[in-house]
Image (cartoon, rainbow, N blue to C red):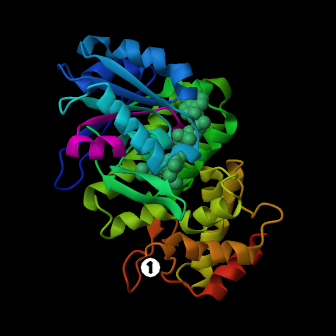
Amino acid sequence: MPTVVVAPAGQEPYDLLVERGALGALARAVGEGTGAVALVADARVFGLWGERARAALAPTHRRVVPLIFPDGEASKTRETWARLTDALVAAGVGRDGVVVGLGGGVTTDLAGFVAATYARGVPWVAAPTTLLGMVDAAVGGKTGVDLPAGKNLVGAFHHPRAVVADVDALATLGNELVDCGVAEMVKHLLVGGGGAADFAALARWRASGPAWLDDAADHVAASVAIKAAVVREDPQEAGRRAVLNLGHTVGHALERVSGYDLPHGLAVAIGLAVEARITVAAGLAPPEVAVAVAAALAALGLPARLPAGVAPAAVLAATAVDKKGLGGRARYALLAGVGRPARGPAGWTHDVPDAVVLAALEASR
Ligand SMILES: NC(=O)c1ccc[n+]([C@@H]2O[C@H](COP(=O)([O-])OP(=O)(O)OC[C@H]3O[C@@H](n4cnc5c(N)ncnc54)[C@H](O)[C@@H]3O)[C@@H](O)[C@H]2O)c1
Ligand SMILES: [Zn+2]
């Protein structure tokens, strides 16, 4: 089965296993023992894949405690974290317990944060069930919850013991959520040196119809390997890891302006297009880069323009809110070329004049 080794500097390396039926490897990833397994999932995913995960855990001979919460970003809060933590105590899960996060990025962020904080840290295994989770959220050790003031404002770095990505789970994923994952895969190619052939292969796979699951493992593995390479060098985002935020400064602002109606991945796709325009306007890259990004998004059927009725000035204002809680101006990860993040005087992120951002947003209506 395709395996990607994630080896963050100074941390235990761990494996990401990705293939059809990978949940069969869940017991091995968790390991035998006496401590209970807290199986964290949202209600939707538990209904679809919970029994399969539970059966896959039987060979560990551990007691399995399902911890279920309502699905959606609105659940990624301190309140859910507290409820799940209280449930662990009530179920008598000790320091020898293991947390399993079965679901999308909301679930793995929450489950990982519960694991990071429970009894000052217990091990956890990520079992991502969305494409976005497999190529991005479940890997890299960032865990946490949202605050009313902004996304992911409370959290911890806590890498999983293993990531088990069963691409069979993608069979029940809606088209829009597949698009969301593909947007992050485009981001990885833009950051990690993808050539025209890689973008074309991604588009062919996306258009391949029911057979797409057969090749999904290879595409997921290739994409996540790009993230793993960045995380290996800079596990705590002291510097270069910030390049993975490409498209996200504008993307997060679009999510906020839409009242979180616009799904994360689609917001990121638009963010990639807008930020490519910013990169050109800031003189960091030639105009062909913005053209190439727009073409890649179009070939994949991903959006590149602001949703109707969204005012550029409102998006600009929301980029500032992104960093308000952290006391700073918005900073942008930008490209020097396709596959080449731009390094500026202050490192891998850039302070861009408001007028440049506004012009790029206007041009993206
Ligand atoms: N930690 C990180 O490095 C990182 C990176 C990227 C994104 N994230 C976070 O990930 C979250 C977004 O992830 P997401 O899009 O996976 O969201 P999600 O976990 O909310 O899942 C989206 C929806 O899909 C449903 N779902 C999940 N798997 C399914 C399946 N196999 N079949 C049918 N339905 C399924 C869920 O119930 C939910 O309704 C955001 O909170 C984001 O901040 C974290
Ligand atoms: Zn993202």
Q: Secondary structure at mark 1?
A: loop
Residue at 41%, 44% in the rendered image = 81
Quick check: 365 above or below 95? below
Q: Is residue 138 left or right of residue 33?
A: right
- Magenta stretch? 113-132
Residue at 40%, 36% in the rendered image = 84
Amino acid type at circle 1 is Gly
Q: Is residue 189 left or right of residue 118?
A: right
Quick check: 216 above or below 288? above
Q: Does residue 286 belong to the magenta stretch?
A: no
List x then y, in percent, for residue 135.
Answer: 46, 43
List x then y, in percent, for residue 108.
Answer: 42, 40
Q: Residues within 10 Å of mark 1 (few under 14, many from 20)?
A: few
**Res 30 → quadrant:** top left
**Res 240 → quadrant:** bottom left
Q: Nearer the viewer, residue 275 or 342?
A: 275
